[in-house]
Image (spheres, rainbow, N blue to C red):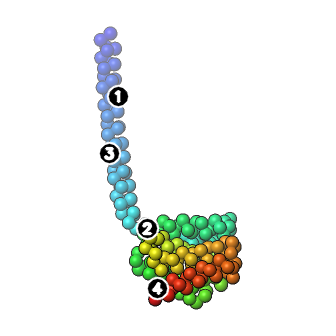
């Protein structure tokens, strides 16, 4: 009986001793992996800038999406991008949409997905950047530019429709205030 009790006690000590040693290195490995993952996420987070041009190119080439679905995807991208756009890039977008309108190029190729989606993207970024209560001319201009670009691209309006002409009159008024 003493032998059985002694063997049971020794077996218990050996098993518990093995368990402690096995769990300790596993915990150390897990914490090392966790610390490594945290360090990697801290170094990669600031670098994660949206490559909007690449995403526009990808969406524009998608054959399984309609023009409406493509425009909606790019508008969603622009709404998110608005939070991170720099002042320099915002100014570039503003210059771009104004120049496209002044040259009358913005509705000349409404079947060109990449071009129209770029116009929609830039106009939405501008329009969402500004507070509507300020009633800034560039905000109004960008909204009408966006509307004309979106609805002609989707086929809801034609380039010579009354709504497009009405928006262009408003854009002309906004341009006079921008000067």
- Return the disc, 1 or 4, that comes first in the chain's sequence: 1
- Return the disc, 3 or 1, that comes first in the chain's sequence: 1
Separation of residues labelled 3 and 2 (CA atoms): 40 Å
Residue 53 percent across, percent down from the top left: 53, 74
Separation of residues labelled 4 and 3 (CA atoms): 63 Å
Q: Are marks 4 and 2 in contact (CB under 8 Å)?
A: no
**Secondary structure found at label 3:** helix
Residue 11 higher or lower than 123, as above or below: above
- Return the disc, 4 or 2, that comes first in the chain's sequence: 2
**Secondary structure found at label 4:** helix
Q: Name the residue under label 4.
A: 178
- Return the disc, 3 or 2, that comes first in the chain's sequence: 3
- Return the disc, 4 or 3, that comes first in the chain's sequence: 3
Q: Are marks 3 and 2 in contact (CB under 8 Å)?
A: no
Q: Which of 162 and 14 is in front in this view?
A: 162
Separation of residues labelled 2 and 1 (CA atoms): 58 Å
Label annotation for residue 15: 1
Separation of residues labelled 3 and 1 (CA atoms): 21 Å
User: Which residue is at 51% across, 83% downward?
Assistant: 174
Q: Name the residue under label 3.
A: 28
Q: Mark 2 points at which residue?
A: 83
Q: In which quarter of the image is the N terminus?
A: top left
Separation of residues labelled 4 and 2 (CA atoms): 24 Å
Quadrant of the rendered image containing residue 116? bottom right
User: Which residue is at 57% across, 72% downward?
Assistant: 56
Image position of 45 (left or right of 75): left
Image position of 4 (left or right of 75): left
């Amino acid at each position: 009986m003493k032998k059985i009790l002694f063997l049971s006690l020794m077996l218990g000590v050996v098993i518990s001793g093995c368990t402690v040693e096995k769990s300790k290195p596993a915990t150390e490995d897990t914490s090392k992996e966790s610390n490594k993952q945290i360090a990697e996420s801290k170094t990669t987070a600031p670098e994660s800038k949206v490559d909007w041009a690449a995403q526009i190119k990808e969406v524009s080439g998608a054959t399984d999406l309609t023009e409406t679905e493509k425009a909606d995807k790019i508008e969603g991208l622009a709404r998110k991008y608005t939070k991170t756009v720099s002042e320099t890039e915002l100014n570039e977008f503003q210059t771009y949409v104004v120049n496209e309108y002044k040259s009358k190029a913005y509705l000349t190729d409404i079947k060109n997905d990449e071009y129209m989606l770029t116009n929609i993207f830039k106009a939405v970024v501008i329009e969402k950047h500004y507070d509507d209560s300020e009633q800034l001319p560039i905000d109004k201009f960008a909204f009408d530019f966006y509307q004309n670009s979106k609805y002609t691209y989707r086929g809801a309006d034609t380039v010579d429709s009354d709504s497009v002409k009405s928006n262009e009159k408003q854009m002309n008024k906004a341009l006079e205030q921008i000067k």
